[in-house]
Amino acid sequence: MAYDVVVVGGGIGGLTVAALLSARGVNTCLLERNSQVGGCVARVQFAGHDFEPGMGLYTSFGPGEIYERVFSELPVDLLKTSLLPGTDKFYSIEGGPAAVAERLAESIKKSGGTLRLNSPVLRLAYDQTGEHAAGVDLLSGETVIARKAIVSNLTVWDTYGKLIGLNRTPLETKKLLKTLQGQGAYVVYASLEESALARLPGERFTVAEFTVAVSPAGSGPAGKRAVTIKTETDPTDWFAFQASEEEYEERDQAALEEVWTRLHAALPTLGSDIEIIETANPRTFYDLTRRKLGMVLGIASKTTPLGHNTSLPNVFMVGDTTIPTATMDAVVESSLSLAGKLTK
């Protein structure tokens, strides 16, 4: 199959670019390796609970801001949002960030674009000269042709290491990539008694090193709420050598006990009204997204000169590792900019 633009990866960045290009009449195909879209904000469900996959605190949903500007071009409506009590810029999203991803996916299809799930991409496909990227090779053996451009929604490390190939990556870019460090997350998915909500600062808040997001009523069994608790962790530490799966499980259990102790010290009002359902660490995120070292919180240095361009003139990047601030609205803003660049 041949398209004008092929987008690799169905995170918020890839979805936004594909939705905008499709709405502007560009023949676009988005390829996602998983069975659902969203990447780092895809739906998370365990034991009858529907968890908030993102940070719980979102900005730029106000009049004239980035989401309104993007969705004004699309054949789908913007999700309902509401300002969080006591703030003038933080919003909650009806259905959470996963619903934003799903709405963008719906837009791609409504605009006549192509969305292919369960379609892992191996590498770029080059023309006979070996210099021009002509499309992408899939794990299935199929080659998907891109007549105009290829957009990578992989991390900067994976765009070069997996898609372009390190043998085709300029030396200066290799040196730069070695200096960039991403951040990892340790996440606890838990069940909270409804009665405990009155003792908390709110349903979405930060305390000490933790971001806490309580999902809406109905997110858990009767009388309970799903709650997501997130803190940063060093991703490289999770990929240190472990001789067996048992050693890895012991490593995860030790991390959980340490995090749980710090959480209760920071938020003693939780008491015994919270129960751990599941955890996620950088290895978990690597298994789910194939992001290098499971780094899901952007670039630790907060600055990167890479932007959209790559070493190849028709291959571009979008996503949280190509911009200084790894927030959802910043990714959407960057994606709008790239869509404009591709439709000049």
Image (tube, rainbow, N blue to C red):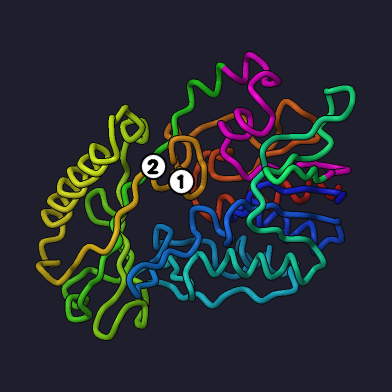
Q: Which of the numbered marks, if any, corresponds to residue 283?
A: 2
Side of 260 where 5 appears, left or right: right
Residue 81 visible in the snapshot:
yes
Pinpoint residue 26: horizontal percent, then vertical percent. 85, 56
Query: Which amino acid type is marked by label 2?
Result: Arg
Residue ID at (50%, 21%): 178
For mark 2, give the secondary structure. Answer: helix
Q: Is residue 180 above or below residue 78?
A: above
Q: Is residue 88 magenta?
A: no
Residue at image coords 44%, 35% = 293
Q: CA distance from mark 1 to mark 2?
A: 6 Å
Which of the pair 341/224 is nearer the observer? 224
Residue at position x 50%, y 75% in the image:
81
Question: Looking at the picture, how far across and down is residue 296, in whole percent?
Answer: 45, 44
Whether residue 333 is visible to the viewer of this picture, yes or no, is no
The 10 Å Cα crowd at callout 2, few under 14, some 14 to 19, many 20 or more, is many
| Residue holding disc 1 | 287
Q: Nearer the viewer, residue 6 or 301?
A: 6
Q: Quadrant of residue 174?
A: top right
Q: Amino acid at mark 1?
A: Asp
Question: Decide: marks 1, 2 in contact (CB < 8 A)?
Answer: yes
Question: Residue 159: where, in percent of width, then height?
Answer: 63, 34
In the rendered view, tell whether residue 18 sits above or below residue 193. above
Point out the stretch of residues depicted in magenta: 145-174
**Mark 1, residues whose alpha carbon is within 10 Å: few (<14), some, or many (≥20)?**
few
- Horizontal side of 36 relative to 218 (left or right) equals right
Q: Residue furthest bottom?
A: 222
State yes or no: residue 158 in magenta: yes
